[in-house]
Amino acid sequence: MNAKWILAASLAGCLAIVNVSAQTDDQLSTDAIKTALASAPRHLQAQIVGIDIGSRTLSLKGSKGHVVPVAVSPQVTNFDSLKIGDRVDVLIKEALLLRAVKSTVADAGLRKRVDTTAFASASDASGFGAAKEIEIIATVQSIDQKKKTITLRGPWHTETFGIPPELAAKKLKAGDTVHVVYISATAVEVTPVAK
């Protein structure tokens, strides 16, 4: 009978630990979303080279030829009128790297991706309260300590992120497989350029 109580107590303890971890991750996501939503958008002129209507995502090709996937905020009301080939002025909130940890899973060489939409209350008048959180298994392509950037090759494309101060990128090196969580770039305004 004591063995049953010990097992029950052990399971209860494990569940408490899992719950605390989940709260920590939720808090991390909420704080990161608030940070992403509070950041000032930057202006970009680009050409639309791809449109995913289901996920409200545009693939934008900038002046240097780089293609960047950008989630389009629900507040952008002209999304349905945009077409491949359109030149657009975009106000974009940059992608925000939340964490990158060296992967220890058995299938570390297999790149994966999980997309979720996360919500946080917007504290300013902009009204933007949602962000797309993406979790991937990726390969580190390069780390530039001078520019404080890290380039990751994920399952669909290669993307460069600014390294946040709390990320210990010094422990990572090119070729490492990492578990990454980031908030994707979000377009908060898309305006077609007059032809």
Image (cartoon, helix red, strand yellow):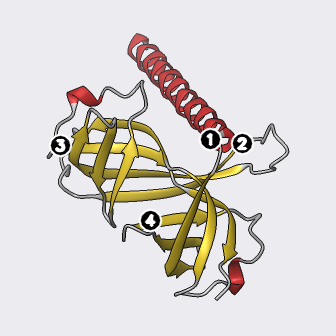
Q: Residue 170: where, in percent of width, then height?
A: 23, 27
Q: Which residue is mark 1?
A: 33
Q: Which residue was labeled with disc 2?
A: 120
Query: What residue sits 85% from the left and 45% below the top?
Result: 125
Q: Is residue 103 visible?
A: no
Distance (Cα) linking label 1 and label 3: 27 Å
Could you tell me which secondary element the residue under label 2 belongs to?
A: loop
Q: In what element is the residue under mark 3?
A: loop
Q: Which residue is outermost to the front?
A: 195
Q: Is residue 78 visible?
A: yes
Q: Give the alpha-carbon distance from disc 2 to disc 1, as whole Å.
A: 6 Å
User: In the rendered image, which quarter contains the N terminus?
Assistant: top left
Q: Amino acid at mark 2?
A: Ala
Describe residue 160's horizontal placement relative to residue 121 as left or right. Answer: left
The crowding category of the residue bearing disc 1, from other C-alpha atoms within 10 Å (few below 14, some 14 to 19, many at least 20), is many
Amino acid at circle 3:
Asp
Q: As rendered, which of 42 and 27 lies closer to the eye? A: 42
Q: Earlier in the sequence, mark 1 or mark 3?
A: 1
Mark in the foreground, 1 or 4: 4
Which of the numbered marks, if any, corresponds to residue 68? 4
Q: Label 3: how many residues lie within 10 Å, few (<14), some (14-19) or many (20+)?
A: some
The reply to whether the C-beta atoms of the residues labelled 2 and 1 are less than 8 Å apart is: yes
Q: How many marks?
A: 4
Residue at the image point whose x is 48% and y is 73% from the top? 59
Q: Nearer the viewer, mark 2 or mark 4?
A: 4
137 relative position to 140: left or right:
right
> Residue tagged by mark 3?
176
What residue lies at 47% left-to-right and 52% top-to-bottom?
A: 134
Compare marks 1 and 4 and give the one earlier in the sequence. 1
Task: Identify the element where label 4 is drawn.
Answer: strand
The crowding category of the residue bearing disc 2, from other C-alpha atoms within 10 Å (few below 14, some 14 to 19, many at least 20), is: some
